[in-house]
Every structure is written in C-alpha cells, then in structure tokens.
Amino acid sequence: MSTTQRSPRTARRGAVLVAALVALLGLSLAACGGSGSSDQASPSGQQAAPKTLTVSAAASLTDVYQQLAQQFQAANPGTTVKFNFGGSDQLAQQVVQGAPADVLATASSKTMQTAVQAGKIQGEPIVYATNQPEIAVAPTNPKQIASFTDLNKPGVTTVVCAPAVPCGAAATAAEKAANVTLHPVSEEQDVKSVLTRVETGNADAGVVYVTDVKSAQGKVQGVTFPQATAQGVVQTYPIGVVAGSPNAQLAQSWVSFVTGPQGKAALQQAGFTTK
Amino acid sequence: MNGVPRFLWLPAALAWLLVAVPVVGLLLRVDLSNFFALVTSDAALAALWLSLKTGLATMVCCLVLGGPLAIVLARSHLPGLPFIRSVVLLPLVLPPVVGGLTLLFLLGRTGPVGGFLYDEFGITVPFSTTAVVLAQTFVAMPFLVVSLEGSLRTAGERYEAVAATLGASPVTTLWRVTIPVVLPGLLSGSVLAFARALGEFGATITFAGSLQGTTRTLPLLIYLQSQDDIDGAVAMSLVLVVIAILVIVVTRTRDVR
C-alpha cells in the first residue's frame, strides 16, 4: 500500500548499484587516462629510482627522437623517455597552459617563442638543426618537374600545407622567393598528409621537407630548388627545458644528448642539417 | 517522478553535465569584441557557404538514394536483408577517417574506379566539391535510412494493404499512402543527415582535401584555425553550435508536438 517506503533491502541494493556505477566510471576514466604520468609523483633523489622524462616534440622529429631515446635510455639506466609528438603550435600551447612536459622541441622559432614569452622555457632555447623544403614527386618524376615554377605547369596537380602551419608558411615564403603563385588543389593540415597525397598518386607534386622525402624510402622522389635555402623558407628546430620541470637535470642531459654528436649523426641521417 | 529509481539521478546528472559543461566552456572562451569580424572573414564565409551548400546537396543525395533504400529494407522480403542492413550501418560505427580512406582507394586517381575516370575522361574526383558531398553522403546516409526505416516499421503495412484492396497500384500507394504517413520520420531523418553532413570532418579531409571555397568546410576550417588562431576557431565553433541547436529544436519540437 505505502509505495513511498522503501524496504531496507531495496535501499541497500540501490546503494550497492550506485557504488558499482561509480566504481565503473572511475575504472573507465582511469583506463582512458592510462598514459598519465602518475609515476612522476614518486619521490626522486634516490639513484635507483626510475625516472620518466616527458618530451613534447614536433611530429617531424618522431623517427629521430624515438631512435635517440633508445640510446639515451641505454646510457641512463632506469630512465624512461616518454614522447608527446604533435604540431608545434599545439605543443607550445600545451606547455603554456601547463601541460606536464620536461622538454619542448618545436619545428619553428615562432612556436618556441610562444613558450619563451610565457616564461615557460629555462634560459635560451638552442637551435640545433634545420630542415629544407623539397618537392616530392612520383618516382621517376613522370611530369618532369625540375623547379619550383614547374609546379604551375598545366596538368600538374600540386598539394601544399596550409599557410597557417609551418610547412605551409615555408611554401608561401618559397613562392615569394621564386616569384610565383601556386594553385594547389589542396592545402593540407600537416606535411605527412601532403606526402601521402603524392605517395598514393592523387597529386603529382607536393611541397614537403627533405626529411619527409627520405622517410618515404623511395615511394617518392625529391626535387630540390634553390629557393629552399632562402630566409624564412628554411625551418629551424629549437629545443629548450621547460621551466619548473621536476626533472630539470635529466631534461638538460637530453638536450645535450640531442645537440651532441650522437644526436647530430641521427639527425643528419634523417636528412636534417645540423649546426 | 516516483517512477525513476533514486540511484539513477547522480549518473544522469553527470551525463548531462558532461555534455553541457564543455559547451558553456566554449561560450566563456568566445572573444565577443571580435566575434563579428572573425565569423565574417573571407575564409569563414567561404567555409560557411560551402558547408551549407554541400550539406543541402548531401541531404538531397540521402533522400534520393537513402529513401528508396529504407523502403526496400522495411517492406521487401529480400534474402540477406539483415546483411544488407548491417552494411548500411557501417558508416555509423566506422571512424570517418576510415570512410575517407575507403573512398580514396576506390575513387582516387590510382583507385579502380577513380583511375578509370581519370584515364578515360580526365576526371579527378578528390579535391573537388563533389568529393565533399560524396564523403558527407557516406557518413550521413545511415541517419536517414535508420530513421525512415523505423518510421516505416512503426507505421505498419495496414494502410498500404487497405489501399491495395481498394485498387491502388503500388506506385499510387507509395505516393498517396506510405510517404504521407512517414513524412515526419522522413523530415527528421533528412534534418539529421544534414546536421551530420555539417559536422563531417574526417572523411572530408582524408578524401577531399582542404582548399578554401572548394573543399574546406566549417569543421575543416575550425581544425585548421585551432593551429594558430584559437579565437577564430572558437568563434566558428560557436556558429556550428548555434546551427546544431537550431537543428535539434527543429527536429525535436516536431517530434514531440
């Protein structure tokens, strides 16, 4: 009759269900955030304590940095290098917003400057490598593209990066230096997308970097052009330790390692020019 | 509200907040002083116009192709109907990027169909506005098909049977009985398809590329601007949120009546 009164059993069952739901929610959130760096909370200072170095690096550094991390970890036992690869603008923004990172390595001085101006970089960032644009074409260069101006030849489908992203800014600067205006069929979000367009044969030519042509391992051919070395066209790679990093010392040794002989060798092999 | 067990209230409130709070966060982030300038820039207007244009074209494609498909699924007795239906649902489950890749491999210049078109007629499908509509239709079609098939099944076949006994041909029955009965479902399905097309990102950028005025729809512009012009991206996002709310209002008020 009295439907409002709940039996203790029902109430308890309700409480159990709530607890189960909450536990489930916590579990699922924890699972989603599995890559969180909870291990940084452990007290450091002891020599044997495992340390995790978090490096926010431009996507174009992925291969080189992963290779260098192996060597770095071998040289520093107990150290794990974790990467956050992405677009330089986004990485710099994340660091400015206080994302947990010990080292910031961007693909342009402009993006690094964002972090420097926000007081998020310890000391001066070091410019340790440069990368030049190159035209990627299909192997054997069927459309016979020999210069930047050839990208405007009739019947040539060209793809570039959008001017808002670094590789697009470089392409725009190259256009100015070569005194031509390109008519691309698409302005991609990142340089790898440009490379894919050429690799899959949907575009005849794309403006990418020397390192991208190398990484494609023969799937595309590179065509160099003299404007690639002009001011504003060359891409610079600064690196800096994030201010307030709990692993500042380790971060500093990563910077020294990347800018040192081993880092240089790996960078050059990937097509970068080192300083 | 004595029908709702009490322990459901907390998760229900959390669910609602999870959706509502980020939108409020977006509102707080909007740069009001420059809002008008940001949403009326050349790039923004081109993207808005392209989004509306391709969204409407997608809606028409979904109606013309998906409408008949829904009727076949709801009314015919083809063998293998469950299989056909699950294929139609595929774009709902697939990440749109995968949809874009499948379209690219089929219709790209080196794909089996795209290669033929390019070699024989010199037609390149990717990088065109047509490609945007194709990508959007791919992801939006299930919304119309599912919604319309549901309406058709709920309406049942009684009226159609009566029409047939009164001597109406199948074609007459379709136009005079079936379509009027499911019109609400048809409309809300179309609006849903349009809304899904407006929000389409992954398939479009993978298959069609990104060029102002040709293939760069609103979501693509927002993603691009989020790289270096956050204020612009936020302003454009707000425009999409407003359109989304309008769409929901239009479909819901009619559904609830």
Image: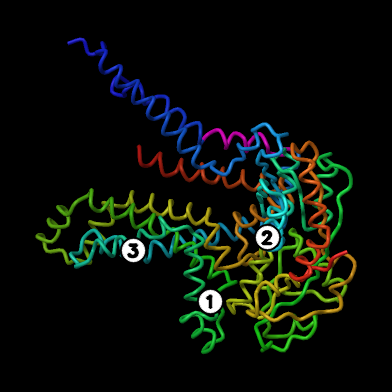
Are discs 2 and 1 located on one and the same chain? no
In the rendered image of this protein, does residue B162 appear above or below residue A273? above
**Residue A87 located left or right of residue B220:** right
* Contact (Cβ within 8 Å) of mark 3 with mark 1: no
**B28 in the magenta segment:** yes
Measured as percent of width and height from the top left, residue A191 is found at: 69, 66
Whole-angstrom CA distance, mark 2 to mark 1, is 28 Å
Chain ID for label 2? A
Q: Which residue is mark 2?
A: A62
Measured as percent of width and height from the top left, residue B9 is found at: 39, 24
User: Of the residues under marks 3 and 1, which one precedes in the sequence?
Assistant: 3
**Element marked by disc 1:** loop
Identity, as a three-letter code, of the amino acid under mark 3: Val
Callout 3 environment at 10 Å: few (<14), some (14 to 19), or many (20+)?
few
**Residue B106 located left or right of residue A118:** left
Q: Quadrant of residue A235?
A: bottom right
The quarter in which the N terminus of chain A is drawn is top left
Q: Which residues are magenta?
A: B20-32
Q: Which residue is mark 3?
A: B87
Chain ID for label 1? B
Q: Which of B83 and A112 lies nearest the eye of the viewer?
A: A112
Q: Which mark is residue B108?
A: 1
Identity, as a three-letter code, of the amino acid under mark 1: Gly
Chain ID for label 3? B
In the rendered image of this protein, does residue B237 appear above or below residue A49? below
